[in-house]
Amino acid sequence: MMNSGRRVIGSEHVAETRAKGRVVMEIMPTDIVTAQAQETAARLGIKLVPGPLERPQVHKTDGATSLRRTLYRRSPRWIAPQRPKNGTASPIRKLALIGAGGVGANIGHLAANAGSADEIALIDVVPGLAASVALDLNHASGVSRSRSRASGGEDLSAVADADVVVVTAGRPRTPGMTRADLIDVNRRVIHTTAEAIRTKAPGAVVIVVTNPLDEMTVEMLRATEFPREQVLGMAGTLDSSRFRNALAMAAGVSSGDVEAITLGSHGDEMAPIVSRARIKGRPLDVFLDGKQIDACVKDAVTGGGQVVALRKTGSATIAPAHASIELIDHIRGARTGPVPASVMLDGEFGISGVVLGVPCHLGSNGLISVKELPLSRSELDALQAAAEAIRERLEA
Ligand SMILES: NC(=O)c1ccc[n+]([C@@H]2O[C@H](COP(=O)([O-])OP(=O)(O)OC[C@H]3O[C@@H](n4cnc5c(N)ncnc54)[C@H](O)[C@@H]3O)[C@@H](O)[C@H]2O)c1
Ligand SMILES: O=C(O)C[C@H](O)C(=O)O
């Protein structure tokens, strides 16, 4: 039934859906669903679900039929960041990478390849390591045609005047360890690096990667005495990527069809946000049952440990590097929209004085604002629990 361009869904439509053996009925944004249809759907066990994000519409133009894509913004695209239309975001002038091990070298590689920075300065305490990675990156530019120039050495003063500093310096965990077991050894490394950043690159945006992430981000904030806008922790982009991958594999779709985010801590108190996750623009339960969704949540939380158990000598490096580049892209304006990062909260989500993974708007000076998404009661409780757990660990 049509009514000024709108489809009115009556109980007969619901009954037709049932008769076809279908259990889901798609409702488009312009549809009007009668109260009777809702009752019939409930009685027959039919789910009325929002239609897909994109749906081709047929339009008649001068007797010809053309197909036009109409975008239905069922949920705001607050998860998947978008590149600016003209794709002309400038590279960062100087990117410093403290730590040229597994994660640091991979960040250097991706940054050079994407032209994220004009100058990439690598620093590592192991003699020759950072210089060798820098040389390797420069050698690759003959093929990749990257314009980035890399340099490497042991001296922390090479952070001087960096616009963005990524800190991966420190020990990774090995099987049998939790990230929290790294607190003592890595806190010392953070303090050493923080001193150099504070004095030589006081205007830099610092991205902490070293574990345990939430605690090390707090240490960096304390030791540099930088405002909260300038110190970000990287974990949410990695955990969200793992969550999206798990959902995509379970639903048999590509990761690009999935929008999902994780908040909270980078550990057992991680909070994958199920209520706002979408597969092809639709809620998860259209594609997956409760058990499958729980398994995906578990996969996101345990993903890091799974890699450690297999690798034995260290932890993941490739996905963390991509996830770090995502933050760098937001800082340099190559991507827009909220992105999960760990920042010191100041009343957002009702939490203060603790570093937690939350959706953030970022820019060239770091944090612009925290985006307080509407979350379900249990998700808000999970954020509060994560904040309390981190607070307790810091006090201990
Ligand atoms: N936040 C996340 O999501 C995430 C993801 C992956 C790894 N991590 C963490 O990142 C850290 C690095 O992981 P990795 O796989 O690159 O380890 P890695 O051992 O391969 O590299 C770490 C490097 O840091 C260097 N280093 C140590 N102390 C230093 C100092 N004072 N100054 C300069 N360099 C120093 C080491 O020589 C080493 O080369 C670990 O703590 C790991 O747990 C975090
Ligand atoms: O798991 C680890 O120890 C490394 C990192 O935090 C990860 O999640 O891959």
Image: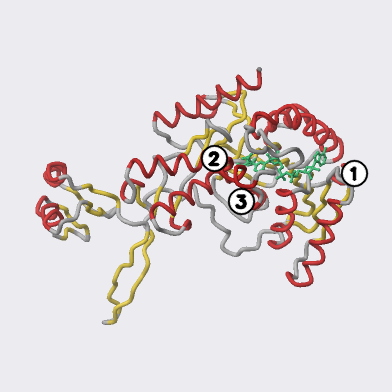
At horizontal 32% and vertical 45% (from top left) the residue drawn is 289
Whether tag 2 and tag 1 are in contact, CB under 8 A, the answer is: no
User: To which residue does mark 3 refer?
Assistant: 319
| Residue type, label 3 | Ala
Q: Quadrant of residue 308?
A: top right
Which circle's residue, 2 or 1, is located before the other in the chain? Answer: 1
Mark 3 near ligand 2 (CB under 8 Å)?
yes
Q: How crowded is mark 2: few (under 14 residues within 10 Å), some or many (20 or more)?
A: many
Kindly report which numbered mark, 2 or 3, lies closer to the viewer in this rendering: 3
- The disc, 2 or 3, on the residue closer to the chain's N-terminal end is 3
Q: Nearer the viewer, residue 26 or 182?
A: 182
In the rendered image, which residue does mark 1 sit on? 155
- Quadrant assignment for ligand 2: top right
Q: Separation of disc 2 and disc 3 at Cα?
A: 19 Å
Residue on which disc 2 sits = 359
| Residue 325 as seen in the image, left or right of residue 253 | right
| Residues packed near mark 3 inside 10 Å, few (<14), some (14 to 19) or many (20 plus) | some
Residue lying farthest to the bottom in this orientation? 63
> The residue tagged with tag 2: helix, strand or loop?
strand
Q: Which residue is drawn at 47% across and 56% down?
A: 255
